[in-house]
Amino acid sequence: GLRRQDKASLYFGIFALLVVVRSSVQDSLLFDWGSYESNFIFDLRYRIEYLGVYLIMPVCTAFFLEILEWKGSRRFLKSISIISAIPFVLTLFLDIYSSVVILSYYEIFLIVIILYIVFVLLSSVFLKNRNARLITVTALMLAATSVNDVLNAKGVIEGSYIMPFGFLVFLFTQSFIISRNFAAAQKQAEYLSKNLKIEVEKQTLDLRKARD
């Protein structure tokens, strides 16, 4: 199976790809066909946007649990995946208005996921996980910029949309952490390999002495 570092890298790559695709759909970059927009295109855009939510949350959660090396995470992750799969399948087949209702109920479940991730982050900081502090800071920054954009969209506040900046910082930071973990793993592997070679040479020398 994949190592934790490999799994974290895989989940992070999928997460980044899903966010980019969903953001492109929201900004009409994938369906910018001029002023013409049929009901089919309208339905497709919003359906992809909703489906993205059900995919992003399990993948994002899996990334945090793997990068923080959180024990006992498989059962919770499996539960999230199953619960997210249900509205995902329903959104594929039901009409767009029913999909909106389903998403509104799923948003309640999102709160549970977010609270669990916050718990994992704070617990990892308390347990002095070397990645926890940096991940927590950037995750809070991403959350803050996201809230800012939502409030702007709702007209609650007036200002700039800065979520892309928050995501860019988050993306760069997680890439740095993954690279640092790989470097540490490589260094440890080289150290163990070197010590093993020394140990083998020592054992060989002892055997030769014993024969003599």
Image (cartoon, rainbow, N blue to C red):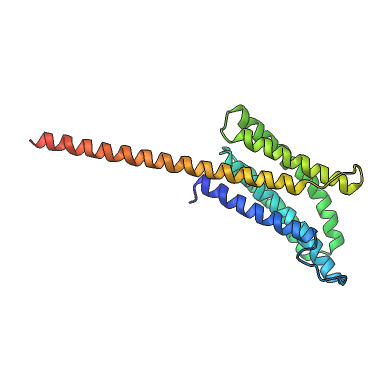
Horizontal arrangement in the rendering, residue 196 relative to residue 24 (left or right):
left
Instruction: Name the residue at 61% across, 34% down.
Output: 132
Residue 144 is drawn in which quadrant? top right
Out of 102 and 172, give the one closest to the viewer. 172
Q: Is residue 51 visible?
A: no
Q: Residue furthest right?
A: 155
Horizontal arrangement in the rendering, residue 194 relative to residue 138 (left or right):
left
Q: Is residue 30 visible?
A: yes
Instruction: Name the residue at 84% across, 71% down.
Output: 34
Residue 210 is drawn in which quadrant? top left
Count numbered badges in the picture: 0
Out of 87 and 186, give the one closest to the viewer. 186
Image spot of residue 56 (x, y percent): 69, 52
Image spot of residue 21 (x, y percent): 71, 59
Instruction: Name the residue at 61% across, 32% down.
Output: 124
Image spot of residue 16 (x, y percent): 66, 53
Instruction: Name the residue at 87% across, 72% down.
Output: 36
Image spot of residue 89 (x, y percent): 73, 60
Quadrant in the picture for the C terminus? top left
Out of 43 and 24, give the one closest to the viewer. 24
Q: Residue furthest left?
A: 212
